[in-house]
Image (cartoon, rainbow, N blue to C red):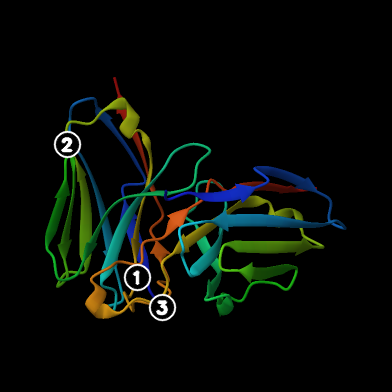
Amino acid sequence: DTEVTQTPKHLVMGMTNKKSLKCEQHMGHRAMYWYKQKAKKPPELMFVYSYEKLSINESVPSRFSPECPNSSLLNLHLHALQPEDSALYLCASSQGILRRSSGKKNIQYFGAGTRLSVL
Amino acid sequence: GENVEQHPSTLSVQEGDSAVIKCTYSDSASNYFPWYKQELGKGPQLIIDIRSNVGEKKDQRIAVTLNKTAKHFSLHITETQPEDSAVYFCAASPANFGNEKLTFGTGTRLTIIP
């Protein structure tokens, strides 16, 4: 099973709302990622969690707040967003830190995304 | 940081013909190069990947070639079928065996003409 599940699939929110995006995986992966994808553009990395700790923040505005409650779950809390934040938000997971000798690859598996519209 | 360029941005081929998508990267530290296929309404799905110690890799109708000296890699799809129609992204990453920071190319919209 290589499934990453994201909820909700669609979300419409006002600029004063607070909402959360959720991501779940049961592959035993220890690295989880949030990406933002605008129409006809490639995914852009926002955050990386490794072993439930934030390891990469790509200078994302504070109105986006990630949370990793446990190794299977990843949340993205949204507050006071702007219309230009409307996009597809993708979650991904990968095995995490690997020994070079393991021969394994840190493949990222993506969810289907949450399509967010900010009015 | 890494910069990945991808060409062409759109590609239309007759069913049964071959399709080739090319990418170049800038960071010599990159040594992991995955290709993702994204269908409408779905997240990107890995279709093939290659490490820098390998020059070519093939999986049925899909192959990837890598020229590390020239810093470019290509995706080859043979005997194309309608279900190959999608957006394809190349990516590059330093395989530090930790949190791979993927840098994506700009994408190629492939259309297979029946």
B16 or B4: nearer the viewer:
B16
For the point 53% across and 56% down, which residue is it?
A: A25
Q: Are marks 1 and 3 on the same chain?
A: yes
For the point 25% across and 74% down, which residue is it? A102
Choose the circle earlier in sequence order: 1 or 2: 2
What secondary structure is found at the residue carrying circle 1? loop
Which residue position holds label 1? B93
Q: Which residue position holds label 3?
A: B1
- Subunit ID for the residue under disc 2: B
- The tag on residue A15 is none
Q: Is residue A66 left or right of residue B54?
A: right
Secondary element at tag 2? loop
Residue at coordinates 60% horizontally, 50% vertically from top-left? A6
> How many discs mark residues in the rendered view?
3
Asked whether, in this view, residue A33 is left or right of residue B4, the answer is: right
Q: Residues within 10 Å of mark 3 (few under 14, many from 20)?
A: few
On screen, residue B74 versus residue A66, left or right, reads: left
Q: Are marks 2 and 3 in contact (CB under 8 Å)?
A: no
Image coordinates of residue B73 in percent, x first then y, are 21, 59
Q: Residue at x 58, y 56 (%)?
A: A24
* Chain ID at mark 3: B
Amino acid type of the residue tagged 2 in the rendering: Thr
Residues A75 and B42: in front is A75
Query: Same subunit under labels 1 and 2?
Result: yes
Check disc 2 and report the residue beneath it.
B78
